[in-house]
Amino acid sequence: MEFFNSALGKNISFVRPAYFIISGFIGIPNIKYYYVFLFFVFVVSVLGNTAVMAVIYLDHNLRAPKYIMVFNLAFVDLFGSSALVPKLLDIFLFDHRYIPYNDCLTFLFFCYTCLSMQTLNLVGLCYDRLIAIIFPLHYHLKVTHRFMFSLIASFWVFVIFVVLIAVGLLTRLSFCKSVLINSFFCDHGQIYKLACNDRSPSFGIGMSLPVLLIWLPLMFILFSYLYIAYALSKVATVQERVKAFKTCTAHLSLVAIYFIPILITFTMSSKIHPNGRIINLSLTSVFPPMLNPIIYVLQTQEIKESVKKLFKIRNAKCTLPGGFYVSAGTRGAL
């Protein structure tokens, strides 16, 4: 981050506290039960996303470009949950609310990077559905492995670059008064509001981040599905429309789970109690990584078939007298 400081001159110094204090869930009754719930969500997230990544890696039938993006989404969910939830539990369950300055900025970087990558992954999956439905004959020409790898790489570079700027601008701030962060993690907006010098650059990037990483992706997804709906309205038969729409249900479920809580928080922030807002934002951060693998396994036929094949449950087993087991496919021979 020295680049940001040297750009202002060598003689400029900043007041950097030794630590920040995370206020988080102070004053919420029975909050320890919520921590138990977060631990459960974390375990399910780790197991579910690890399973999805393993299934896609092991089954060669799932090497289509679409599942490269699904694999990346599972990786981001796993990485994001591992970056956020254990530290969150350490801070509040074991009362380690004092977090060193550099550790706080590092915590912020990883949390914002993973949360931002989730939205861009949804954009990539939306583009895949858009091309598959609007240009089915050109799908394999437009959505290739090389294209998908390039798209994912560009997402990572863009997000890391933007978040690094946000973190770098925070290093230009002086903190002369309070170091109490009114959030459940090192939240960018809550940190720069504590500064006692000019915070307009951080304010500007703070206003830009939601636009770049939430609202623009959401607008792209909404307009894409409006276009898809218009295209499906031109299809001759109802069965063809339903069949095409079913390929979008998993993605639409992910979009709803991720964006609806965010929209509620932003549109009703003045009516929501601060503690309610913190809990809602924390659920928005930890819930999608848990539900994403469940939704894809349940609503994607290819993954369901792959799971059945890998775990050898495609052929149902029946029990013979004496405790012997035989697969349903061999009963006729007996």
Image (spheres, rainbow, N blue to C red):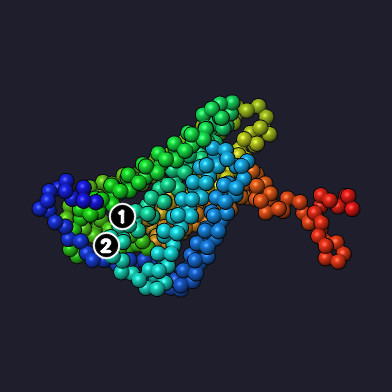
Q: Nearer the viewer, residue 218 or 319?
A: 319
For the residues labelled 2 and 1, the Cα–Cα distance comes to 13 Å
Labels 2 and 1 touching (C-beta < 8 A): no
Residue bearing the label numbered 1 = 188
Q: Is residue 156 left or right of residue 6?
A: right
Disc 1 secondary structure class: helix
User: Residue 141, image x and y in percent?
Assistant: 54, 27
Percent x, y of residue 211: 35, 43
Q: Pick whichever, 321 or 287, lies toward us.
A: 321
Q: Residue at x 53, y 65 (%)?
A: 40
Between tags 2 and 1, which lies in front? Answer: 2
Q: Few, some or many C-alpha atoms within 10 Å of disc 1 (few <14, some 14-19, many ≥20)?
A: many
Q: Quadrant of residue 138?
A: top right
Closest to the observer, 261 or 301: 301
Q: Residue at x 37, y 45 (%)?
A: 159
Q: Residue at x 57, y 47 (%)?
A: 57
Q: Amino acid at mark 2?
A: Tyr
71 sits left or right of 174 in the view: right
Above or below — where is 71 with respect to 228? below
Work out whether residue 64 can be spotted.
yes
Q: Is residue 306 left or right of residue 216?
A: right
In the depicted structure, whether residue 3 falls above or below residue 65: below
Residue at left offset 67%, top offset 54%: 311
Q: Which residue is mark 2?
A: 101
